[in-house]
Image (spheres, rainbow, N blue to C red):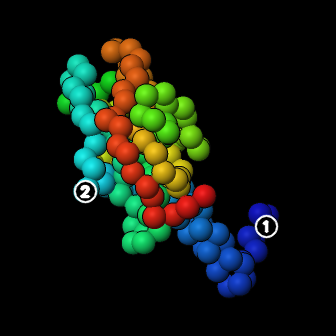
Amino acid sequence: MSAKPSAMSPTRRFSIAVLVVAIAIAAHASAASASTFSPVIPPSTWTWGDCNISAGPVFDGFTSNWGVIGGVQVVCRSTHSFISTTVSEQWSSNGATFANYGSNGSAYFPKTSGFRSDYIVQTGRLCGSGYWRTAATVQIGGLGTWTFWSAPKNTTTGCHV
């Protein structure tokens, strides 16, 4: 004689459903970064093999307190064994000597042709005055590793440190 499975209470079923939805939302938020590059300062772009790389400032939606956010996007015409990126924002007081500033962003995608058109790997949001540029180290299976630097821009952010 087999045991009859116990019925799950409606409260427990609802709790599990809420947990599943919360996990799905968290996974989507960490795996995707829907954004666009700045419409005011366009990204620098390069072609490497069959891939197009864009790096530069990402649009910050704050109207008066905007900050600097660096970003990189990789889109290839064919599938590569992997694509890995690390992006950092760099700051300089004089436009000559740059240093990493703030937190980096990174992503790794196995067996891919690159990112969706609305996916940009981003740094954290930064504030201050000076010269800003984005540094993006891109590693693509079959091509190697290369670091790209966007054109520096002298600007003062709307937010202040």
The furthest residue to the bottom: 10
| Residue corresponding to mark 2 | 39
Labelled pair 1, 2 in contact (Cβ < 8 Å): no
Q: Residue at x 36, y 27 (%)?
A: 148
Observer-nearest of 123 and 27: 123
Q: Residue at x 79, y 67 (%)?
A: 3
In the rendered structure, which disc, 1 or 2, sits on the residue that comes first in sequence? 1
Observer-nearest of 16 and 97: 97
| Residue corresponding to mark 1 | 3
Looking at the rendered structure, the secondary structure element under dot 2 is loop
What's the amino acid at mark 1?
Answer: Ala
Residue 20 in view: yes
Residue 119 location (% of width, % of height): 36, 49
Q: Where's the C terminus, which quadrant? A: bottom right
Q: Where's the N terminus, which quadrant? A: bottom right
Observer-nearest of 160 and 38: 160
Residue 106 location (% of width, % of height): 51, 38
Observer-nearest of 155 and 125: 155
What's the amino acid at mark 2?
Answer: Pro
Instruction: Categorize mark 2 by other alpha carbons within 10 Å: few (<14), some (14-19), many (20+).
Output: few
35 shown above or below 15: above
Residue 30 location (% of width, % of height): 53, 53
Q: Residue at x 52, y 53 (%)?
A: 128
Q: Residue at x 35, y 37 (%)?
A: 152
Looking at the rendered structure, the secondary structure element under dot 1 is loop
Relative to 69, is 5 on the left or the right? right
Q: Of circles 1 and 2, which is in front? A: 2
Using the numbered discs, state the Cα–Cα distance from disc 1 to disc 2 in whole angstroms. Answer: 65 Å
